[in-house]
Structure formats: C-alpha cells, structure tokens
Image (cartoon, helix red, strand yellow):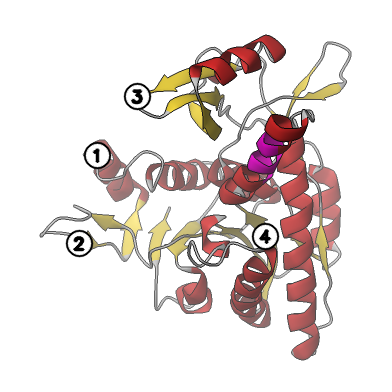
Amino acid sequence: MKKLAVIAIGGNSLIRDKHHLKVEDQYREITKTVKHIAEIIEAGYEVVITHGNGPQVGFVLRRSEIAYEYEGLHFVPLQSCVANTQGAIGYQIQQALGNELKKRNISKEAVTIVTQVRVSKKDPGFDHPTKPIGTFYDDKKAEIIKKDHPDWKMVLDAGRGYRRVVASPEPIEIIEMDMIKHLVENGFCVIAAGGGGIPVVEDKDGSLEGVGAVIDKDYASALLAINLKADLLVISTGVDRVCINFGRENEKPLFNISVAETKKYLKEGHFEAGSMLPKIQAILWFLENGGQKAIITKPDHLKKSIIGKCGTHIVK
C-alpha cells in the first residue's frame, strides 16, 4: 500500500476574511486547497482529509438563534450543527477534489463519511464546560433560555452578556472506523471526522446518543491517524511554521524538531491555548502512539511541506 497521510484542514482556512463569508466564497477557497491535496496524491500518497468547522457551526447556531428570537423556532442541537457542517463542508471538498482529480486524469474518487466520535460520559469537561458557543444574551433573554434549556450552562462575560459554554471532551473511539479503513484500503480519498466528529456517548445497552459538546478537531485527526497507522499527520493552519517566542523580537521559526525538543518548548510555555497548543499536543499524541512524522504548515504549502521545503516537521 502507498504511504498514507492524514491532512487536517482548519475551518478558518476555508474563510479568506470577514468580507468573504458566503458558501460560494468558502467553495472557492476549498478549490484552492484541493489543488495542493491533489499534488500530494500525485506524489504517491493515499490521503484522508479532516476539516475544522468552528466558524461554520457558529453560522448555523446564529441562524438558529435568530429563528428562535424572531419566530419562536426550536434551537438546532449542537451535535446536529456538527453533523450539518460535516455534510456541507464534506460535500464541497468531495466535489472540488473530485473535479481536480479528473482534470489531472487521476482515477480516484472522494467520499465523505458523516463521522461519530465516542466520548466518555465521565469526561471532566462535562462537569466544567469552558468552550463558548453562539451569541451573547442580556439578562432577560438568558433567563428565558435557562428555563427552556435547564441543562445548558450560561456564563456571564463581563460587558457583553450571557453566553452558552459546552464541554470539549477527549475523543475515545471513531465509530465509523472500520468503514473508513475499508474505503482507504480500496483506494478512496476519504473525508472524515469533520469538526472533530459528532460527539456521542454510549449507554449501558450499547446504543449511542449525541451530546452537545465540541471535540477538538486536531485531537480527532490524531486519533484517526493513529487508528489508520498513518505515515504522516499534516495539520494546516494560518502560519507556515511554528515559532517559539511568537510575536516577540526574538521570534524563531522551527523547521525540524524532535519529540523531546517539542516537549521542552511545550514545558516552557511557547504555545498558546486555543491556538498552537492543541495542535502540538495532538501531534505528540500521534507520535507517541505509532506515528513517525507530523507537519504543521499553511494550506498552500502542503506539497512543498511534504517534500521538506516548508513547514515545521516534528519527528519521532
């Protein structure tokens, strides 16, 4: 079998700027990114694609909130928002990549898997949810929402109002893993675990139930790469290389670093929470569980990074 690369596309990288937020704008950005993914396929890799969905889930939630506020329609459950964006973004990647492969006369098809990811009911994140989602509400509206949704946790953000916060539990198991493996082994380019996957918990009888939470997409991508025994995990983001002393006069880009060096920089506090920190932690998890190499780079530098000309390369 060819070498296998799991490529994680950031949700923010699908949106150029605040003036290009429409679905059509997103598709145009995707058509640019899949050109670089097609180049990796041409270079001899099998490819599995994951993607973020932070801004896109925010759009779905906002539409739901407006419909609730003005028409009294029900809120869309968070797990359904994740599923919606998995399907919508997956469709765009699937179509754009399929078109690009045809242009290059590559006999390969792309397919999207709506992916559930099991988390633990006892994950500490459920006791102390911290991930903010949705819009801000004043005191009166927040009280109404609390009555309608007593299981929601609303927190006061000084000066801006109340906002819902949810858990970000650790991914344990990718439910559709056997299906994904089968498709990869048969030559398909699979798009899976979008937005970290739809979080589900398992009941005593083995049945699954969706929960209102957000799984970190980088951790889910790492879990997918571990289960597939991928040769390479690539996380695309807004910068070409990881830096230490980021934003300071002595900022230094990192090119090739070991796990030991990465842990040293991690301990020294060089990586910010909510930004580079989860990417680094996910990569270390991958490398400590069978992975050999990981890369962090910009979407348009994917091919150059694969051949060693760009990006930060972290090796076992």
Looking at the image, the residue that sits furthest to the front is 70
Give amino acid for label 4. Ile
Label 3, label 1: how far apart the Cα atoms are: 27 Å
Q: Within the magenta stretch, is there residue 137?
A: no
Work out whether 216 lies above or below 305. Answer: above
Could you say whether the residue bearing mark 2 is in a helix, strand or loop? Answer: strand
Q: Quadrant of residue 312?
A: bottom left
Badge 2: residue crowd in 10 Å (few <14, some 14–19, many ≥20): some
Query: Which region shows up in magenta?
Result: 60-66
Label 1, label 2: how far apart the Cα atoms are: 14 Å
Nearest the camera: 316 or 134? 134
Could you say whether the residue bearing mark 1 is in a helix, strand or loop? Answer: loop
Mark 3 or mark 4, earlier in chain: 4
Label 3, label 2: how far apart the Cα atoms are: 35 Å
Number of numbered discs on residues: 4
x, y percent for residue 276 = 38, 48
Could you say whether the residue bearing mark 4 is in a helix, strand or loop? Answer: strand
Q: Residue at x 41, y 46 (%)?
A: 280
Nearest the camera: 214 or 116? 214
Identify the disc placed on residue 252.
Answer: 2
Q: Which residue is mark 4?
A: 49
Work out whether 225 lies above or below 138. Answer: below
**Residue depth check, mark 3 versus mark 4: number of the one nearer the observer:** 3
Q: Quadrant of residue 46?
A: bottom right
Identify the disc placed on residue 15.
Answer: none
Q: Are marks 3 and 1 in contact (CB under 8 Å)?
A: no
**Residue depth check, mark 3 versus mark 2: number of the one nearer the observer:** 3
Q: Which residue is mark 3?
A: 158
Give amino acid for label 1. Gly
Q: Which residue is mark 1?
A: 269
